[in-house]
Image (cartoon, rainbow, N blue to C red):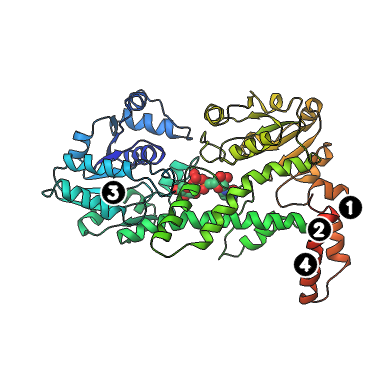
Amino acid sequence: MRVAMIGTGYVGLVSGACFADFGHDVTCVDKDKEKIAALERGVIPIYEPGLDDLVKHNSREGRLSFSVDLTEAVGSAAAVFIAVGTPSRRGDGHADLSYIYRAAREIAEKLRDFTVIVTKSTVPVGTGDEVERIIREARPDADFAVVSNPEFLREGAAIRDFKHPDRIVVGFEDERAREVMAELYRPLYLNAAPILYTGRRTAELTKYAANAFLATKITFINEIADLCEKIGADVQEVARGIGLDNRIGTKFLHAGPGFGGSCFPKDTQALIKTAQDYAAPQRIVEAVLAVNDVRKRAMARKVAIALGGSLRNKTIALLGLTFKPNTDDMREAPAISVVTALQDMGATVHAYDPAGMDQAKKVLPDVTYCDTPYSCAEGADALVIVTEWEQFRALDFARLKKSMKSAHLIDLRNVYRAEEVARQGFSYDGIGRPNSHVLNDEPRVVTWLSAAGPSSHAESARELEAFLAHADERGVGA
Ligand code: UDX
């Protein structure tokens, strides 16, 4: 089947390469001449494990090609995918659909026989209707159908996610379009990936609802983590304790510095805006976004507290800058807010990231970038793990301790356990877990919970309230 993929960003390039790998004949189109020239030479513009080989292999086999001109690609395609960006519009937070609509107008000019036009970009409800209207207006004679087929892949695991999806969602209004989509995804259907056929608007909303729900799950556990720190509980055990309930599930319950990336912040914002327009406000999602924004900067305060309250003349070494491991993507990375807040408090920041430093330099110019975690830590007052890259999971603490000014580890991803780090002579602060201050100080929290032994629920609630009211005075959680 011939496929045209308009836009060679994350979603477009990965989907195009994977469709080619299924055996379809795919042309990826992009306006950026340099990008297309580079792709033709096999140079991949993004960091995504396995994508390099997939693109090279399918190009060699003649199933994947690149072009700046969509005339031939669209004219001969059974399905034309729109996978261009939908960034947040400056000022109001709505998704900016100008790239989508421009692509629709350009596609309209080139349509020949019956063609299915598929929106793969994340777009607000009703965008499919508008795409259809634009094409119909430009080409009243054209035979086409517009489908919504949102993509759920994650950066860093994109190829696996595309080839082994939990589900494929296809929103359609024309039966002929359903048949084309079924044929396109047939290889996955044989893998038993469920295809959910819905109305077009339903498919559009499903994507936003999925991302908003995941963002909510993360934010929920992050707030529970804050409470854990105050009362001396362990958020990882709480997460496991609730996650083993099948209705909740263990995934996406890792407490951390807040979610970032190219999707969650933008998509939750866009959902909030759409919902307000339709007078059906999504108050939970509004709270999620607000809590997450504040959280990123609050992580810098955690560092300050670990160092006794002030960061003046302190050097902080940051490990990991990208919004998550296995990507070079810095979009909305928590590290950006953490670094600027640390600098606002007077700290000097050193940083190391295995893949993201080139991107980071563009948004965080006043940072000293280092070649290894160890050179990064030299002379530092504290080491902060911001992104859980694999190579930070087995740091040589003896070596680090020798070169650091003072041995503090602030672990925003809970990579380590307080006891093992304390054994190496480091003080430790994780997220939502008893930190080493509490451990060394004899666990006041544990004493309260067990020795005071609240005898009834009502009593327990009252005591907890009183305890929390005085928690700060007692130094618990600090
Ligand atoms: C996300 C969705 O998962 C994907 O389905 C959609 O297509 C695009 O958006 P992605 O942005 O690549 O994918 O990253 P994801 O792995 O979902 O992580 C997003 C953010 O949440 C990261 O900053 C990550 O560190 C954070 N996160 C994730 C947590 O803090 N805790 C978790 O338990 C999971």
Residue 237 point in image, percent of width and height: 70, 57
Q: Earlier in the sequence, mark 1 or mark 2?
A: 1
Q: Residue at label 4?
A: 465
Q: Residue at label 2?
A: 471
Label 4 close to label 3 by CB (< 8 Å):
no
Return the mark for residue 118.
Answer: 3
Please state which amino acid type lies under the numbered disc 2. Answer: Ala
Residue 130 point in image, percent of width and height: 26, 52
Of tags 2 and 3, which is closer to the observer?
2
**SS state under label 2:** helix
Q: Earlier in the sequence, mark 4 or mark 2?
A: 4
With respect to residue 226, does 351 lie above or below?
Answer: above
**SS state under label 3:** strand
Of tags 1 and 2, which is closer to the observer?
2
Q: Residue at label 1?
A: 442
Label 1 close to label 4 by CB (< 8 Å):
no
Q: Earlier in the sequence, mark 2 or mark 3?
A: 3
Of tags 1 and 4, which is closer to the observer?
4
**SS state under label 1:** loop
Q: Earlier in the sequence, mark 3 or mark 1?
A: 3
Please state which amino acid type lies under the numbered disc 1. Answer: Glu
Graded by Cα atoms within 10 Å as few (under 14), some (14 to 19) or many (20 or more), the crowding at tag 4 reads few
Q: Residue at x 23, y 34 (%)?
A: 70
Q: Is mark 4 within 8 Å of ligand 1?
A: no
